[in-house]
Image (spheres, helix red, strand yellow):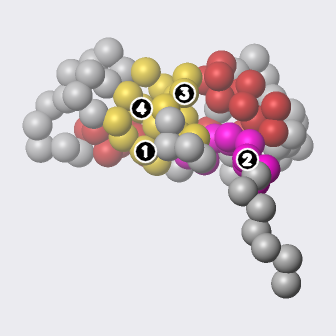
Amino acid sequence: MAPRTRTRRRKLEICICAAVKCPTLLIRGHRHADCFRNLSERPMKVEGPFEQGFITSRNRFVDREEGLRLQLRAGVPAFGGDGYQDQLYSEDLY
């Protein structure tokens, strides 16, 4: 068996789920609506501003525009076959 090499090909970063970021929280969900529903059901009111974006495979929050760039760079097609618009939407993921 050949020894492992130290140089491994790095996997391309992709978006894995929707997220909503506010000053005190980062909420993840399948869709942005799920994130907002989670926020509305919290016992304490959460103040905005809210930014919609995505969590990546490297556990990073990115906005819709950067999310689209990551998906395109990795060659990930938009779910549903209609293609991407000018920014990434959670419906594009799955």
What's the amino acid at mark 2?
Arg
CB atoms of marks 3 and 4 within 8 Å = no
Q: Which mark is residue 10?
A: 2
Q: CA distance from mark 4 to mark 1?
A: 7 Å
Q: CA distance from mark 1 to mark 3?
A: 12 Å
What's the amino acid at mark 1?
Arg
Nearer the camera: disc 1 or disc 3? 3
Q: Which mark is residue 62?
A: 3
Mark 3 burial class by Cα count in 10 Å: few <14, some 14-19, many 20+: many
Is residue 85 in the magenta section? Answer: no
Drawn side of residue 35 relative to residue 14, left or right: left
Nearer the camera: disc 2 or disc 3? 2
Residue found at the very far left of the displayed protein: 44
**Residue at (32%, 45%) from the top-left corner?**
38
Nearer the camera: disc 4 or disc 2? 2
Lower position in the chain sequence, tag 4 or tag 1 = 4
Q: In the rendered structure, which segment of residues is drawn in magenta?
A: 8-18
Would you name the residue on which mark 4 appears? 20
Mark 2 burial class by Cα count in 10 Å: few <14, some 14-19, many 20+: few
What's the amino acid at mark 4?
Val
Lower position in the chain sequence, tag 2 or tag 3 = 2
Q: Position of residue 58 (x, y in %)?
A: 56, 43
Q: Which mark is residue 28?
A: 1
